[in-house]
Amino acid sequence: MVRLFTDELNVGYSDRLIVKNLSVHIPDKKITAIIGSNGCGKSTLLKAITRIISHQTGSIILDGENITKENTKVLAKKMAILPQTPESASGLTVGELVSYGRFPYQSSFGRLTKKDYEVIDWALDVTRTKEFKFRPVDALSGGQRQRVWIAMALAQETDIIFLDEPTTYLDMAHQLEVLELLQKLNREQERTIVMVLHDLNQAARFADYIVALKDGQIVKAGNCEDVINHHVLRTVFQIDTEIGRDPRTNKPMCVTYNLLKGDS
Amino acid sequence: MIQPALIKRQRLILCLLFLLIIVTMVVGMGLGYASLSYDRLLPTILGKGSFKEEFILFSIRLPRIIITLLAGMSLALSGAILQGITRNDLADPGIIGINSGAGVAIAIYFLFFPVQAGSFIYLLPVIAFIGAFLTALLIYVFSYKKNEGIQPVRLILIGIGFSMALSGIMIVLISSAERSKVDFIAKWLAGNIWGTDWPFIWALLPWLVILVPFTFYKANRLNILGLSEQVAIGVGISVERERILLLITAVALAASAVAVTGGIAFVGLMAPHIAKALVGPRNQLFIPIALFIGGWLLLLADTIGRNLAAPDGIPAGTMVAIIGAPYFLYLLLKK
């Protein structure tokens, strides 16, 4: 079952195309990782699918409807997005920020209902940020702050969650913490997760489906065995990799790599 | 989710500002070219004053006080909205050229169309309005880019450009005009409150009565828009539509105020900024305070200004600029 897919999508700024003729299916209730080198269009693709930027031609279909024709508030109940490195929350408390996730459900004047408060508390619970509820977001550490932003996305109660590099600027432990949280949400609540990741080994370990992009086009899309291999990585990143096995998860992993010399 | 302590603090500040406004009003009622002593104020208000006292209070002082109060509030709200949608603390209807647009329209009308004394004062707000809207529209069109929409920073820069260009046009217009006509325009430019009669209050009040609740209705959207554009789109706000709607609101507020008071800048910059410093960035909390501060600032400026140099006084716009310009510089330096 596929609820979300793009069809011959073209996205660009001014006259420069970033995403070219791209058709991709996002598997439902799975974790999808988008990988690729800097400037390959992975963030642009994510922004286009989540209507943050508009696309030139082609279509993005969610539940049989073209998203450009769908009401933006209706879409906000179906998909949430955690943007790349959210800006400062300018003095807001954690609870307030998470409550913004309830916007699509509010009618007027932004009054929160009992249901809203329950969902907010639940989102704080799941992300283990409840203790910070009345603290300013800006006073938290990077990892805590990232969890708060995820809580806000969760408060939207959407089936699909998009994340643009959710692990950037976090140390190794906090990276893992965020990814495990996403995995838990996927497994226990069957949420579809789509994220841009930089780390290949994290992609291999956590994603069910990996989309490898180069120059705005798909080089390979499939499970980790299909994508994380010498041949694909050579094309995508111009690197010569040594692929081994993670001794704990048995997933493929890039043990070491070299830059390709010339065009050999 | 807002801490109760913060709400309490906001209520307290509101009460203090309210008192401050009342005190300034009372002081202002007794000050002026024609004398009205303070011990005669209360009897006059209660209808027991002489004809002269009633005339001074109800036909001269009170309308002017109410006009400045309302105009200050409109400008403050306009500035608060502009700062919200552009995510820039330096936005102000005067700085991004909306006031100049109104000014040029008034100058053109005044210089090139036959002016009849009677209808002129009632037409002026309409003319100012048209000028302000055309300017806002042009600024909008020029800062709009296909696929990207409106970029707040570009909007401000283009606004400042327009403001300068319009000031240039103004100089060309004035330099080719007759001396007597230049006087009025010069006074208007300096922010000399000239519309000091009850009809002007009735012209200004409806805008506030409609647009203040409207802005409160949009307060939560403004909060989220102020956070980040991507977050706003993500939670389902039609960013472009809200921006246009709020921009029109801000222009309407500024134009209606400026038409009556002349070119007054800095109130829209200072009032929201001080309010945010006092109670933080949540629109539903700081907007009431910004309204009160804006009204009080202009009232204070005009009360001092009109008593400093008899009989004409110093224009309120000049008085505000004396306080506002250093504040603007301070903000710039702090950044």
Image (cartoon, grey):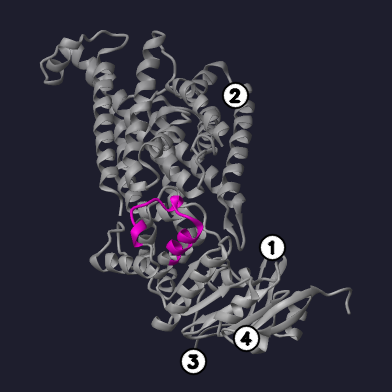
Disc 2 residue type (three-letter)? Ile
Q: Is residue A191 magenta?
A: no
Rendering coords of residue A153 (x, y %): 43, 68
Crowding at label 4, few (<14), some or many (≥20) Cα neighbours within 10 Å? many
Q: At 45% across and 48% down in the image, what residue appears?
A: A90
Q: Which mark is residue B241?
A: none
| Mark closer to the observer (3, 2) | 3
Q: CA distance from mark 3 to mark 2?
A: 71 Å
**What residue sits right under mark 4 in the picture?**
A224
In the image, taking residue A219 as reference, residue B270 lies left or right, namely left
Quarter assignment of residue A225: bottom right
Task: Decide which of tag 1 and tag 4 comes sooner along the chain.
Answer: 1
Numbered range of the magenta stretch: A130-150
Q: At 35% across and 42% down in the image, what residue appears?
A: B287
Crowding at label 1, few (<14), some or many (≥20) Cα neighbours within 10 Å? few
Disc 4 residue type (three-letter)? Cys
In the rendered structure, the residue with mark 4 lies on which chain? A
| Mark closer to the observer (4, 2) | 4
In the rendered structure, the residue with mark 1 lies on which chain? A
Q: CA distance from mark 1 to mark 4?
A: 35 Å
Q: Which mark is residue A1?
A: 3
Q: Which mark is residue B174?
A: 2
Q: Are marks 3 and 2 on the same chain?
A: no
Position of the N terminus of chain B, as image quadrant, is bottom left
Q: CA distance from mark 4 to mark 2?
A: 74 Å
Q: At 42% across and 53% down in the image, what residue appears?
A: A137
